[in-house]
């Protein structure tokens, strides 16, 4: 993955991370929060606008020491906060602007009316100092998504915390996928949450194919077991192998047999109205003979993309 750099004072993009506390639920790779739908309805704003005093309203985040808030940039459903100027023309922001539409088209989900606040720290030290101060029990990970129920009036705020690091592009796409899903669904099972985030963290040209996960699963040993994945409810149970398998099942559902895709899209629709729709594996068993074998065949046939994503401007 091409390294991206976001430079203070002009934007060329660098690196990313998410978090939570009381009233928040830790969910995979960096997701914290409740599953409640946010109540925020953002005012329409021009594409990629650097906001100012006369611009449409953007929520002023509560003052938390060490959290970057000097500058903000509205991009689609996202508001990026930082302590250095941001440039809307940066290629990463242009790409992220299309992410909500990409999810809606792929997953047949309705557009969300929620606003996602993204706090970009300039360096890892500042980011980790913030985590240690406000979320001392959290492991230090490169990115966190938080659905914080302590927003104004008891509303749910969708928050992403990260810093300018080597994996900014991937981490932002991953965590923003979590935020978008939690904005329109009543609940997201842990394996599905992480599998979808692993699918959409890849640049659009990869079409959801994660080369690192695919290569690791091919090397093996790998014996898929979706029913086991569905029983996992704690992020501590999700190790590298579980993240890889979660991505593999999502890629299979979306790029494998058409009947499997129908099962997943129907299941996602049920998550719009209930956080407990049951497991998806029995539904897959009903339409696909030997899903485990079918998944292995799908991975064997998958082709690793050769195109490289364009890099942003560097310092």
Image (tube, rainbow, N blue to C red):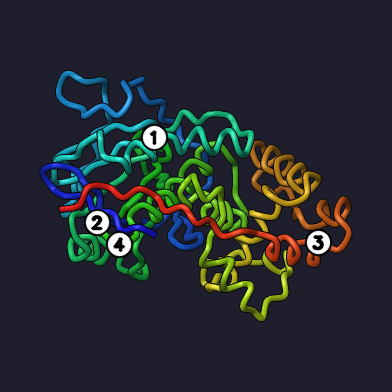
- Counting residues from the start of the chain, the first of labels 2 and 3 encountered is 2
Would you say the residues marked 1 and 2 are in contact, meaning their CB atoms lie under 8 Å apart? no
Residue at image coords 49%, 46%: 205
Residue where numbered disc 3 is placed: 291
Is disc 2 placed on a helix, strand or loop?
loop
Residue 61 is left or right of residue 66, and the answer is: right
Would you say the residues marked 1 and 3 are in contact, meaning their CB atoms lie under 8 Å apart? no
Residue 114 is left or right of residue 211, and the answer is: left
Residue where numbered disc 2 is placed: 164
Quick one: 311 or 167, which is closer to the camera? 311
Residue where numbered disc 1 is placed: 97
Residue at image coords 57%, 70%: 215
- Local packing at callout 2 (Cα closer than 10 Å; few below 14, some 14-19, many 20+) is many
Q: State the image quarter where residue 46 is shown.
A: top left
Residue at image coords 13%, 48%: 8
Measured as percent of width and height from the top left, residue 13 is found at: 25, 49
Measured as percent of width and height from the top left, residue 20 is found at: 38, 57
- Counting residues from the start of the chain, the first of labels 1 and 2 encountered is 1
- Counting residues from the start of the chain, the first of labels 3 and 4 encountered is 4
Whole-angstrom CA distance, mark 4 to mark 1, is 20 Å
């Amino acid at each position: 993955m091409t390294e991206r750099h976001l430079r203070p004072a002009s934007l060329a993009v660098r690196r990313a991370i998410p978090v939570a506390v009381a009233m928040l639920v830790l969910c995979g790779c960096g997701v914290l929060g409740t599953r409640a739908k946010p109540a925020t309805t953002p005012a329409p704003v021009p594409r990629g606008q650097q906001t100012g005093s006369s611009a449409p309203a953007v929520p002023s985040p509560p003052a938390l020491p060490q959290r970057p808030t000097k500058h903000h940039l509205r991009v689609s459903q996202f508001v990026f906060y930082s302590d250095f100027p941001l440039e809307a023309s940066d290629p990463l922001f242009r790409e992220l602007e299309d992410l909500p539409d990409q999810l809606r088209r792929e997953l047949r989900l309705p557009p969300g009316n929620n606003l996602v606040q993204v706090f970009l720290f300039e360096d890892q030290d500042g980011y980790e100092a913030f985590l240690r101060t406000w979320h001392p029990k959290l492991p230090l990970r490169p990115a966190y998504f938080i659905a914080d129920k302590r927003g104004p009036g008891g509303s749910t705020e969708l928050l992403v915390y990260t810093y300018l690091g080597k994996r900014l592009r991937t981490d932002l796409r991953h965590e923003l996928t979590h935020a978008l899903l939690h904005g329109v669904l009543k609940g997201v099972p842990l394996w599905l949450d992480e599998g979808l985030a692993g699918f959409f963290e890849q640049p659009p040209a990869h079409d959801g194919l994660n080369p690192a996960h695919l290569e690791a699963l091919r090397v093996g040993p790998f014996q898929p077991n979706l029913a086991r994945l569905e029983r996992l409810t704690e992020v501590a149970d999700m190790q590298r192998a579980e993240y890889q398998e979660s991505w593999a099942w999502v890629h299979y559902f979306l790029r494998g047999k058409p009947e499997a895709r129908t099962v997943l899209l129907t299941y996602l629709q049920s998550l719009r109205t209930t956080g407990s729709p049951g497991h998806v594996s029995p539904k897959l068993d009903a339409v696909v003979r030997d899903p485990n074998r079918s998944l292995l065949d799908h991975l064997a046939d998958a082709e690793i993309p050769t195109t490289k994503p364009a890099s942003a401007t560097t310092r």
